[in-house]
Amino acid sequence: ERPCDLFTFDSFWPETREKWVKQGAPKEILPAYGERRTSRFLRDYFQFGFDYFRSVQTGVGSHIDHEPSGLGYGIEYRQITPIVPNYEPRIISEDERTITYISGDGQTMRSLKDAAFRMPTYLDWPVKDRASWNEYKKRLDPNTPERWPADWNAHVQETNKLGEEIPISLDVGSFYGYLREWVGSEKILYMFYDNPNLIEDMMEQILYLETEVIKRVVKDIRVDLATFWEDMAYKG
């Protein structure tokens, strides 16, 4: 209502929603019903007072799609980094409690079968040196047609029309967060010291990718806000 008002937006773990359903909430709040419709349903049903916005659909940005991955056990189609094409998720091994698999980003991960959306255990990463980076880098071309919706013009018209009523957001992506997802938390810190030229090349590619995507989006769509993802934390 006022220029100084804070934008209110939040989300909830799938396990939390499942618990709410068991306590009497409607099943429509569950992620399986589609994140876009579910988010609005959560806002309207619980009267949280959240603001609503539309994100521009591009192949840049950080997200976890709660769509079936084919792996079972509720394992999500997980792609945090903007690679196109993504890796085909596949199971490596499993036991009674856990499943070890390759994610959409090319990481090897282990998740609990009964709590698949919680933070997984990271076992291996796709970028280890200059040679593996050169191969991975091919997936970061901003002009890859598959990075954009096939019906981009229709998406532009729909988004601009929505922009007359609600804010339009562009997820610009990340810098350090992507590096960490590609190399691993500890290994990327050593790489800053041991191989700064490789770090610079990786960041230059991220900058090129994100800049080219931004140029195309703002040429066609009126964007009201931009979001950047980083996830740096330590104990406590």
Image (cartoon, rainbow, N blue to C red):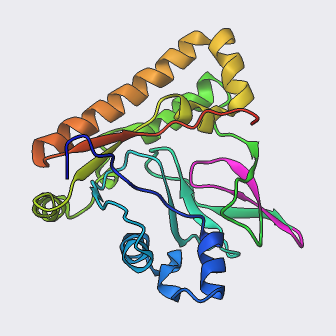
Q: Nearer the viewer, residue 29 or 43?
A: 43
Q: In the figure, 34 relative to 4: above or below? A: below
Residue at the location (59% across, 89% down)?
Answer: 24
The C terminus lies in which quarter of the figure?
A: top right
Q: Nearer the viewer, residue 149 or 117?
A: 117
Q: Position of residue 170 (x, y in %)?
A: 29, 46
Q: Position of residue 33 (x, y in %)?
A: 46, 81
Q: Position of residue 102 (x, y in %)?
A: 68, 55
Residue at the location (57% across, 29% down)?
Answer: 133
Q: Residue furthest right?
A: 96
Q: In the figure, 111 relative to 211: above or below? A: below
Q: Position of residue 115 (x, y in %)?
A: 73, 68
Q: In the figure, 39 relative to 167: above or below? A: below
Q: Is residue 141 left or right of residue 131?
A: left
Specify the quadrant of the image occupied by residue 206.
top left
Q: Which residues are magenta?
A: 95-111
Q: Nearer the viewer, residue 16 or 65?
A: 16
Magenta highlight on residue 152: no
Q: Nearer the viewer, residue 180 or 26?
A: 26
Residue at the location (33% across, 34% down)?
Answer: 210
Residue at the location (67% across, 10% down)?
Answer: 193
Q: Is residue 9 left or right of residue 197?
A: left
Specify the quadrant of the image occupied by residue 149.
bottom left
Q: How many marks?
A: 0
Magenta highlight on residue 110: yes
